[in-house]
C-alpha cells in the first residue's frame, strides 16, 4: 500500500469533525444553546459533501493508476479487483453498526430514543441493500410511512427520534457511485466521459435542493467535481514532490494554500446555513468549494497538514473518519439512553456529559477501526491480489 496523502487525511479529519458537530443536536436538546446558534449560522452538514469530493477524487485516481499498472491492460480485472477491495473496505464495519443499532432498539431503548424496533430493522435493511438514500428521501418527503421518525421518546429532543442510521443515506449514494464508476471510467473514452460529467454537473446547478428534500439525498455534484479534479491531475500531481526546486518558497506556498483552503471551508459552511442552502445552485457551489480543497490536497505536497502533535492528531482522526462516521450517531443515542436510565440532570453536569460522549465516540471509533475495519480491509486487498493472480 502506498504512503498516505496527509493533506487528504486532513480533509477527512475536517469533514468528520464537521459532521459529528452537526449531529451533536442529538446531545444538545435545549433550543437556546451555542450549538444551535452555530447550526443556524453555518451548515456543517457540508462536511459530507467534502467527503463526496474526496471519494470522487480518490476512486478515480485509484482506478486510473490501477489500469496503468495492469500488465495486460485488462479493464475487467481492474474493475473486479476494485469492487472486491471496496466491498471489504466498507461493508463489514457498516454491517456491524447496523446490527448494533437494531439490537439497541430492542434491548437498550427505555427512553425510546432509538425509535420503533421494527422500523429500525427496515432502516437497517435499506442500509444493507445500499438504498438508504432512497428510503430516507421517502421518509422526509412523507410518501414513505414506515420510517423510524417517531415521537415516542421519553426524553427532551429537538426532533423526532429513531434516526440513528440516517448517515447510511450517504454511504448508499457512494456505493451506487462505486458500482457505476469503474464501468464509466474504464470502458468509456475520456472524450465522451468528461464532457458528459460536465453537462450533468451543469444540469444540476439550477436545482433547488434544500436539506432533507428528495433531491438532497441524490446530490452528485461533489462526486463529479472530485472525478474531474483527478482527471485534471493525471500524470502530474500523483508524484510526491520533494525536489529542491519545489522546496524553494515552501513556507509561502503553505501559507497561501492554507488561507485558500480555509476560505473555501468557511464559504462552504456559510452557503450551507439554513436559508442559504435552499437557494438554487447552492449545492453546486458547495461542491466547488470542496473541489478547491481537494485540488490543493491532491497535489500531495503536504501544503495543509500541520506538523507536530496537532498533525498527528488530525492524521489519526482522518484515518478513522469512516469508523467515526458510522459510530457517532448510535453512540450519541446510547449516551442519551444511559443518562435517562440514571436519571442524571444533564444541564447540571455538562462537562461530564460532553466528555463522556466524546470519549465514547473516540473509543468505539478506535475499536471499530482496529478490530473490524482494518482487518477486513487487509483481507480485501489479499483477495484482490489473489484474484488478479488467478486471472493471469
Image: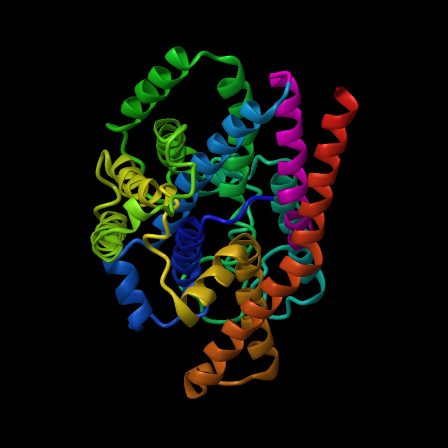
Horizontal and vertical percent for residue 242? Answer: 38, 47
Q: Residue furthest bottom?
A: 348
Query: Is residue 105 at least partly visible in the picture?
Result: no
Q: Is residue 334 above or below residue 1?
A: below
**Residue 112 x, y percent position in the rendering:** 59, 65
Q: Quadrant of the C terminus?
A: top right
Q: Image point 58% across, 55% down: which residue?
A: 323
Asked which colour scheme the image uses, the reply is rainbow
Magenta stretch secondary structure, dominant: helix
Residue at 62% x, 31% y is 82
Q: Is residue 142 depicted above or below 311 in this figure? A: above
Residue 106, quarter of picture: bottom right
Q: Residue at x 57, y 65 (%)?
A: 331
Q: Position of residue 247 (x, y in %)?
A: 30, 51
Measured as percent of width and height from the top left, residue 274 is found at: 26, 51
Instruction: Count every numbered label the image shows and give the total.
Output: 0
**Extreme residue toward the front, this view:** 244
Foreground pick, 242 / 211: 242
Q: Is residue 39 visible?
A: yes
Taking the spot 69% from the left edge, 40% from the top edge, the residue there is: 381
Q: Residue 86 lies in magenta, yes or no? A: yes
344 lies above or below 53: below
Residues in magenta, as a range: 72-97
Instruction: Assess whether residue 229 is covered by the magenta stretch.
Output: no
Amino acid at each position: 500500500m502506498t504512503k498516505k496523502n496527509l493533506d487528504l487525511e486532513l480533509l477527512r479529519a475536517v469533514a468528520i469533525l464537521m459532521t459529528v458537530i452537526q449531529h451533536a443536536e442529538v446531545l444538545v436538546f435545549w433550543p437556546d444553546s451555542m450549538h444551535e446558534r452555530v447550526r443556524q449560522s453555518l451548515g456543517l452538514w457540508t462536511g459530507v459533501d467534502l467527503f463526496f469530493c474526496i471519494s470522487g477524487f480518490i476512486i478515480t485516481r485509484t482506478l486510473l493508476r490501477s489500469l496503468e499498472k495492469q500488465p495486460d491492460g485488462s479493464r475487467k480485472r481492474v474493475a473486479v479487483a476494485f469492487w472486491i477491495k471496496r466491498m471489504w473496505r466498507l461493508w463489514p464495519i457498516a454491517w456491524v453498526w447496523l446490527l448494533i443499532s437494531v439490537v439497541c432498539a430492542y434491548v437498550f431503548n427505555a427512553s425510546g430514543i432509538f425509535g420503533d424496533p421494527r422500523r429500525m430493522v427496515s432502516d437497517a435493511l435499506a442500509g444493507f441493500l445500499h438504498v438508504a438514500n432512497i428510503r430516507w428521501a421517502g421518509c422526509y418527503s412523507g410518501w414513505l410511512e414506515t420510517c423510524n421518525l417517531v415521537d415516542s421518546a421519553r426524553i427532551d429532543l429537538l426532533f423526532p427520534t429513531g434516526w440513528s442510521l440516517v448517515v447510511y443515506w450517504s454511504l448508499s449514494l457512494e456505493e451506487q457511485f462505486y458500482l457505476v464508476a469503474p464501468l464509466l471510467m474504464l470502458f468509456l473514452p475520456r472524450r465522451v466521459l468528461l464532457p458528459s460529467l460536465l453537462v450533468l454537473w451543469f444540469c444540476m446547478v439550477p436545482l433547488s435542493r434544500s436539506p432533507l428534500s428528495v433531491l438532497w439525498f441524490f446530490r452528485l455534484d461533489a462526486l463529479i467535481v472530485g472525478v474531474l479534479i483527478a482527471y485534471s491531475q493525471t500524470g502530474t500531481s500523483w508524484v510526491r514532490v520533494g525536489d529542491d526546486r519545489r522546496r524553494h518558497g515552501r513556507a509561502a506556498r503553505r501559507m497561501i494554500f492554507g488561507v485558500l483552503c480555509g476560505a473555501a471551508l468557511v464559504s462552504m459552511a456559510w452557503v450551507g446555513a439554513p436559508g442559504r442552502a435552499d437557494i438554487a445552485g447552492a449545492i453546486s457551489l458547495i461542491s466547488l468549494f470542496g473541489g478547491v480543497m481537494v485540488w490543493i490536497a491532491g497535489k500531495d505536497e503536504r501544503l495543509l497538514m500541520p506538523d507536530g502533535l496537532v498533525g498527528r492528531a488530525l492524521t489519526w482522526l482522518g484515518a478513522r473518519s469512516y469508523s467515526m462516521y458510522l459510530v457517532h450517531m448510535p453512540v450519541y443515542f446510547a449516551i442519551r439512553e444511559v443518562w435517562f436510565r440514571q436519571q442524571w440532570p444533564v444541564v447540571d453536569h455538562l462537562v461530564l456529559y460532553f466528555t463522556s460522549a466524546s470519549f465514547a465516540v473516540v473509543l468505539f471509533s478506535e475499536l471499530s477501526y482496529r478490530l473490524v475495519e482494518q482487518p477486513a480491509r487487509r483481507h480485501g486487498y489479499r483477495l484482490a491480489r489473489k484474484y488478479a493472480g488467478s486471472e493471469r
